[in-house]
Image: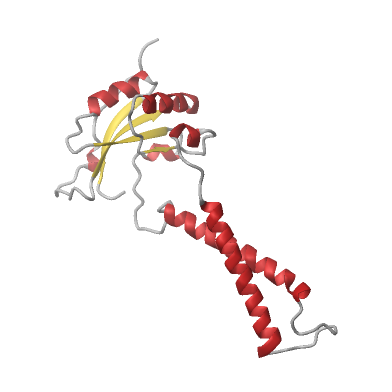
Amino acid sequence: MTSPAVTTAVPATIVHTEPATHSSTKRFALGIFDDEDVLLHAIDNIRAAGVKIYDVFSPYPVHGIDDALGIERSRLPIAAFFYGMCGLAFALWLQFYTLGFDWPMIIGGKPHISLPAWIPVSFELTVFFTCHGMVITFYMISKLYPRFKTPVLDVRSTDDKFVVAIELDEQSSQLPKLTQLFRENGASEVNQKEMTKF
């Protein structure tokens, strides 16, 4: 079985005419894969070789990739519980203040402060705070906030390719070793790319 062809050319669109500061410029070795099974196997082998993977980009969620990358379980449910408790507390305070003090009304002969009657509003505001809080938190930690141009290491990762990104040092001295490592694990292409903002 022949090894897949490998290229190490840098696209012209990523060449910068002005030198960027070290703090904002990152160089990456990109391994392009065509199949998700080959990708998962490659991730295991690359990590076993002691290489740290910066990130993996895929056109759709790949089952098992979190475990392969060694990503810990998300703490987003903890934030969801906190947002839900805030919503519940706000709902109880709102009804307690409005119906008990600000504008008390007798509805169906119930007392002004009636906890059973507050259940629907309390439930709705708990869900409302939880959903919106989780979405905003997810966007913030994923850096998916609005911007004029979203940095993409390889646009094909939004179509039909799987991209493994490994951050290089300033001299890119690891590139030959990484190129060989990608080739041995089924990468159909290997590229180097430099990003000024990521």
Which residue is situated farthest in the top direction here?
1
**In this orientation, which residue lies closer to the viewer: 155 or 137?**
137
Q: Residue at x 43, y 51 (%)?
A: 142
Total count of labels:
0
Q: Residue at x 77, y 75 (%)?
A: 117
Res 152 → quadrant = top left
Task: Classify 112 as above or below 153.
Answer: below
Residue 97: percent from left, percent from top: 65, 84
Question: Is 65 on the left or on the right of 193, as rendered?
Answer: right
Task: Classify 82 as above or below 154.
Answer: below
Q: How is the image coloured?
A: secondary structure
Q: Residue at x 23, y 29 (%)?
A: 174
Residue 10: percent from left, percent from top: 24, 34
Question: Is 43 on the left or on the right of 134, as rendered?
Answer: left
Which residue is situated farthest in the right direction here?
109
Residue 62: percent from left, percent from top: 52, 35
Q: Residue at x 40, y 10 (%)?
A: 1
Question: Is 81 on the left or on the right of 57, as rendered?
Answer: right
**In this orientation, which residue lies closer to the viewer: 30 or 94?**
94
**In this orientation, which residue lies closer to the viewer: 5 or 136?**
136
**In this orientation, which residue lies closer to the viewer: 143 or 80?**
80
Res 176 → quadrant = top left
Residue 31: percent from left, percent from top: 35, 30
